[in-house]
Image (cartoon, grey):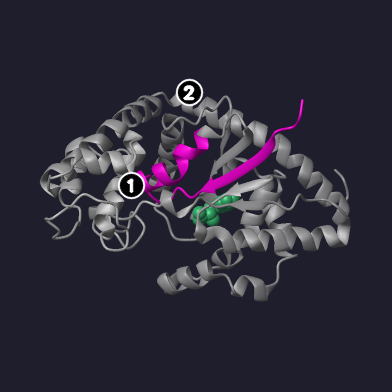
Amino acid sequence: MEEKKVMLSGIQPSGDLHLGNYLGAIKNWSARTEEFDCYYFMADMHTITVRQNPADLRRRTLEQLAQYIACGLDPEKNTLFIQSHVHQHAELGWVLNCYTMFGELSRMTQFKDKSSKHKDNINGGLFTYPSLMAADILLYQPDYIPVGEDQKQHCELTRDVAIRFNHIYGDVFKVPEPYIPKAGARIMGLTTPESKMSKSIPEGCVFLMEKPEDIQRKFKRAITDSDTENPVRYDPKEKPGVANLMNIYAAVTGRSFQAIEAEFAGQGYGRFKPAVGDAVVECLRPIREEAQRILSDKAYLESVYKAGAEKASYVANKTLRKVYKKIGFVAK
Ligand code: TRP
């Protein structure tokens, strides 16, 4: 049998998951289960580069895992784990720090952004974050890294570091490709249709675990426009708010834009917005209920992350041993 290609991605448990995360990323992940050998982890070690409340970090890490499973990521078929449970990440991260240049790290836009937002805590971890991310990736020798556009620069640095290392020591790392979804999958904020849905603007952000009445209220307040002639039609340039709602409606119902235009022909936003809200509520209901069920079953959740860490550690260790040998560390 031909070996499956490997995919790996990490998500920081820095905020609650929302509809944009689900429709833009997580939903597609479960569709890849059969074709690829997939690793997904909660990047808790990356999250502490910005100060966290410990109880919240712990809660969100477990909630995220429960939500991934509830979104359809089958833990029997995907390797789901918590980054800090696999010590090889920290170890290879250190090694790769020594093969990543100060100048390279200084050019990272995420570092520049985050250090300007958190001026009181520009720590070393924030600066060397990309070396740890390179370690996360290279340990598993993946073919593809599914990430958002914002992580492209980090993926490119990972490739550069892998190539540099291989150049010195021979073929140790596979050089992976980023795998970036097309723009259509981007869900914008309900109150800011010009920018991505984000937890930092909660009025325009629908969280996966949110109550149905709160979701409905957010959709009723979504920004549209004053078009009364032919309101529900797909025109992302002229009508970004409506296009975003249509995108969401299309994604959760599977209907085409044409079918949606026909469904709401001659009707105003007073009918359209609550209809999108209803469809989203129905799409999220089973996810929310399943996530709550999983979260209340602590023994199950623990068995998932333990098994995930064990499998991940086995694979990661093979790469780390090879690296240690190449660079001249004495075998234990
Ligand atoms: N830096 C990524 C983000 O903020 C999270 C991440 C950490 C990651 N390690 C990774 C993504 C490895 C892909 C692969 O979104």
Reading the image, the residue beneath label 2 is 300
User: Which quadrant is the N terminus positioned in?
Assistant: top right
Asked whether residue 252 appears in the rendered view, the answer is: yes
Q: Amino acid at mark 2?
A: Tyr
Asked whether residue 18 appears in the rendered view, the answer is: no
Mark 1: which secondary structure? Answer: helix
Which residues are the magenta region? Answer: 1-30
Whole-percent x, y for residue 13 in the image: 45, 47
Q: Amino acid at mark 1?
A: Asn
Whole-percent x, y for residue 126 in the image: 54, 65
Mark 2: which secondary structure? Answer: helix
Vertically, is 244 above or below 66? Answer: below
The residue that appears at 13% across and 55% down in the rendered structure is: 229
Asked if the beta carbon under badge 2 is closer than 8 A to the nearest atom of ligand 1, the reply is no
Which mark lies nearer to you, 1 or 2? 1
Mark 1 in CB contact with mark 2 (< 8 angstroms): no
Reading the image, the residue beneath label 1 is 247
- Checking the image for residue 149, the label placed there is none
The residue that appears at 54% across and 25% down in the rendered structure is: 303
Q: Residues within 10 Å of mark 2 (few under 14, many from 20)?
A: few
Vertically, is 303 above or below 260? Answer: above
User: Closer to the N terminus: mark 1 or mark 2?
Assistant: 1
Residue 8: image quadrant is top right
Whole-percent x, y for residue 316 in the image: 71, 41
Measured in 3D between alpha carbons, the distance from the residue under mark 1 to the one under mark 2, in whole angstroms, is: 35 Å
Whole-percent x, y for residue 254 in the image: 36, 35
Question: Observer-nearest residue: 132 or 206?
Answer: 206
Question: Observer-nearest residue: 236 or 1?
Answer: 236
